[in-house]
Image (cartoon, grey):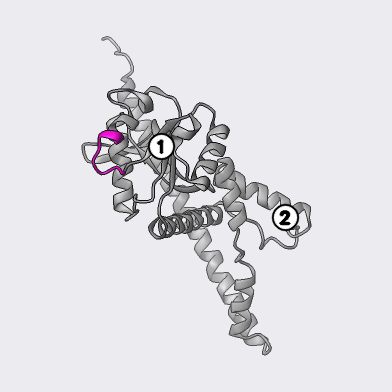
Amino acid sequence: MVIGGVDVTATKKKRKGKQMEDERIKNKMVKTDADTAYAQSRELLQLNSISSSSYTDMDAITLEYESQNCLDFPTLARERDLYGISDRAAASIASAASRDIGIVHEGETSHVVDRNKICRQSRKLQNAVAESTKLTVSQYLLTGLYFDGRKGKTKVLIKKDTKYYPKTMKEEHYTLVNKPNSVYIGHVTTATGGAIKEAILNFFASNNMQLNGLKVIGWDGTNVNTGHKGGIIRLMELDPNTPSTKFFGWGNYWSLQNFVDQLVKQSKPVRSYL
């Protein structure tokens, strides 16, 4: 008679099943204890409400309201987006600052900031900025356009079969700015020069933005912008939907910004500067 080896797969399955059963029993016991404690607390609350004639339902509502943090944090949400920190980190910093100045202490915790509040405030602020940008874009003519691209990490959902999986990938984001005064218009996400040109023109068309007042367009000196065949500027020159506009490139951003501001204000053609 020979004793066989241990069936590792079957052993793991049985061990996992035993752990799940123990966890289920433990959760059931905790739930039972919690239900019992809740029932006892409800009985005590009813007895106290009956014995105290000065305590009313309005007092209970007031106490519940005062125990919640109903303050808004728009500036905190803006700084959180500006520096790219997480909601948890922003909430922790806000709570720590409140504790240092005495707003939050051992007997007063209603002003502790939760990360979900920061998330809601950030989403509310982003929606407000987006709506304000759309309103500005639709009401005013574009005079000077500057665009620049940058690759950034973006969280996306990849679909495989019937499920979605989160993934972080690098995307090229082109930011559009109206000059002068550096008014943010929006951004487009594409890869090639032709696709970027189409995305920019489609963005203006979808937002009902007129290009009749466009005087100058500025960009940096990368090949995707300046290519003599497939560059964005060359494709814009050939596109019939683009108005007769002065095109120029620039290497330094701050020099470009000052140049565009002066050019738009004085309404001089770009050739007078070359």
The question of residue 72 being in magenta is answered with no
Does residue 231 appear anywhere in the picture? Answer: yes
Does residue 150 appear anywhere in the picture? Answer: no
Q: How far across and how far down the image is residue 216, in percent?
A: 42, 40
Q: Residue furthest left?
A: 161
Q: Which mark is residue 174?
A: 1
Q: Quadrant of residue 67?
A: bottom right
Of the pair 226 and 264, the residue shown nearer to us: 264
- Could you tell me which secondary element the residue under label 2 belongs to? helix
Q: How far across and how far down the image is residue 246, in percent?
A: 39, 37
Q: Which residue is drawn at 55% across and 40% down?
A: 84
Q: Residue 81 carries which label?
A: none
The question of residue 242 being in magenta is answered with yes
Q: What stretch is highlighted in magenta?
A: 236-243
Q: In which quarter of the image is residue 102?
A: bottom right
- Could you tell me which secondary element the residue under label 1 belongs to? strand
Q: Would residue 116 be found to the left or right of residue 212 on screen?
A: right
The type of residue carrying mark 1 is Tyr
**What residue is shown with label 2?**
98
Q: Magenta: predominant secondary structure element? A: loop
